[in-house]
Image: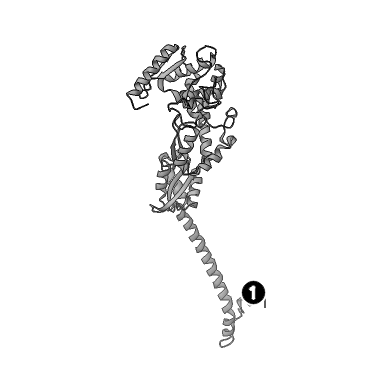
Amino acid sequence: MTDMESLLGDQTPTPAGGRRAQTSRRRGPGCLIALVIVAVLAGAGYWGVSVGLQKVKDQFASAKDYPGPGTGEVSFEVKSGDTLAVMGRGLKAKGVVASVEAFTDAASGNPKADGIQPGFYSLKKEMKASDVVSILVDPGNIVTTNVVIPEGFTVKQIEERLVKETGFKKADFDAALKDPKALGLPEDAKGDPEGYLFPATYKFGPNEKPADMLHDMVARWQQSANDDDLEAGAQALGYTPHEIMTIASLIEAEGRGKYRTKISRVIYNRLENPDNGLTNGLLEIDATVNYALGRDDIGLALTEEDLQVDSPYNTRKYPGLPPGPIDSPGDAAIQAALHPADGPWLWYVTVNLKTGETKFTDSYTEFQQFKQEYLQYCESSDAC
């Protein structure tokens, strides 16, 4: 008997009552196997059709999304250059959205999505994708710590403000200030950040450390120096950029508004005419003496004892410029240092501290008259 015959059984006719049952028994297993094969094939066909239908169904079904509004708090960073797909993957990994597709679909339906700004955003877990997009497209939702540094602040005052506003310790900023290379200070600053932490409003991200913050401030100074064309302007005047920054800091401490360029001229007249027989090359700027004394308020009135402090910053005692800036000058003071007014003045006196009114002269006699005017003002005012 062949293998096929063994499988199908003997097909030879037999007399009634003969071996039919036996033949039937032989056919039983073969038929069962055949039926199993048919069933398997049929099942496979059904499964294939079912999977295909499910794929088609999935293709046209909505992407998986959370109903919102979400719970908890998640800090999410959008980095410069991130695509919507990259954002979507990051959001899904943090449990903010249910699927990348839900986010990208919601973003494609929002015309502002192409303008999402880098930064940190405060989100929740399991948010509706469209709600996430609404938050990301608004730059006002970027999480920052805002710190305002006014013009004329010293490094000491800036550090105190940063400690108060950011929550970092003074020791953290002290350590950062000791690394001038990391801060990006110019070489002629000789490692001293005074004058190079630019006064402005800063928005610090949640991951920024003290060194990053201070670096941002020096970078902002560099931007201002480029905008003001500091290097070329200094060269045209015959000074170094560091000397111009020093002069700008004196102007910042001494004057305001329309008087800045005149104060600038007084400083240059004294520096460039040391043998005039009147000033002996001394700038005689009281703010430098207060700086030498380590005072936060460099506009305080001085005593005779104060004037004797032995410091290269004491311009009442030592001629020429002090070693460096005494505060952080803003753009207006830097511009005044680069573009002094024309005039012969050697003295100036602010005769009204509330209005800032300042008078200028090249006559010592008139200067004394201005001083008397100031003293009379102080007698009738609590501003002195």
Front-most of 223 and 306? 306
Q: Residue 82, can we see it?
A: no
Quarter that holds the C terminus: top left
Residue kind at label 1, given as amino acid type: Met
Front-most of 227 and 70? 227
Residue count near mark 1 (Cα–Cα under 10 Å), binned few <14, some 14–19, many ≥20: few
Residue at the outermost front position: 305
Front-most of 214 and 309? 309
x and y percentages locating residue 52 in the rendered image: 49, 57
x and y percentages locating residue 246 in the rendered image: 52, 24
Residue at the outermost right position: 1
x and y percentages locating residue 356 in the rendered image: 38, 22
Q: Which residue is mark 1?
A: 4
x and y percentages locating residue 371 in the rendered image: 40, 18
Above or below, 222 relative to 59: above
Above or below, 231 relative to 193: above
At 53% from the left and 36% from the top, the residue drawn is: 215
Above or below, 32 relative to 350: below
Quarter that holds the N terminus: bottom right
Above or below, 36 relative to 337: below
Give the structural element (helix, strand or loop) at label 1: helix
Asked which colour scheme the image uses, the reply is: one colour
